[in-house]
C-alpha cells in the first residue's frame, strides 16, 4: 500500500490538548492499515507560536520528527534542533 503524506487531506484544527493556536493534521495511516500494534501515523504541522498542550497517552508510543523548537517530556523541557527524532514512551 502506498500513500503520499504531501497529498493527504489537510485538516485545520485548534488548541490540541488545550494548547494554543491552529495546526495542520494529515491523517495518513490508521489502525486497520497495520498488522502490528501501531494505532496510527499522522503528519502534524505546528507553526511557530502554536503549541500542543501537556498530555499523557496510555499504551501508545509517539515519535516526533521536529524541525525546530522545544518540547517538554515528563516535565523536562528540551531544545530541539532540525533532524532530532523524539520517541515518547508509553504512559509518558
Image (tube, rainbow, N blue to C red):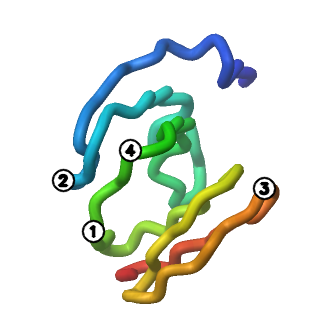
User: In terms of secondary structure, where does tag 2 sit?
Assistant: helix
Q: Which of disc 2 and disc 3 is earlier in sequence?
A: 2
- The quarter in which the N terminus is drawn is top right
Residue 55 is labelled as 1
User: In terms of secondary structure, where does tag 4 sit?
Assistant: loop
Q: CA distance from mark 2 to mark 4?
A: 11 Å
Residues at marks 1 and 2 touching, judged by CB atoms closer than 8 Å: yes
Q: CA distance from mark 4 to mark 1?
A: 15 Å
| Residue positioned 47% across, 37% down in the render | 30
Q: Which of disc 4 and disc 2 is earlier in sequence?
A: 2
| Residue positioned 67% across, 18% down in the render | 6
Residue 91 is labelled as none
User: In terms of secondary structure, where does tag 3 sit?
Assistant: loop
Residue of label 2? 18
| Residue positioned 49% across, 27% down in the render | 26
Residue of label 4? 50
> Foreground residue, 10 or 49?
49
Horizontal and vertical percent position of residue 37: 52, 60
Amino acid at each position: 500500500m502506498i500513500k503520499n503524506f504531501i497529498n493527504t487531506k489537510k485538516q485545520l484544527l485548534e488548541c490540541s490538548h488545550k494548547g494554543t493556536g491552529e495546526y495542520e493534521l494529515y491523517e495518513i495511516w490508521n489502525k486497520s492499515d497495520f498488522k502490528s500494534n501501531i494505532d496510527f501515523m499522522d503528519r502534524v504541522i505546528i507553526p511557530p507560536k502554536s503549541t500542543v498542550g501537556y498530555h499523557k497517552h496510555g499504551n501508545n508510543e509517539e515519535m516526533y520528527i521536529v524541525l525546530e523548537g522545544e518540547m517538554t517530556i515528563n516535565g523536562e523541557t528540551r531544545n530541539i534542533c532540525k533532524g532530532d527524532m523524539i520517541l515518547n514512551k508509553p504512559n509518558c
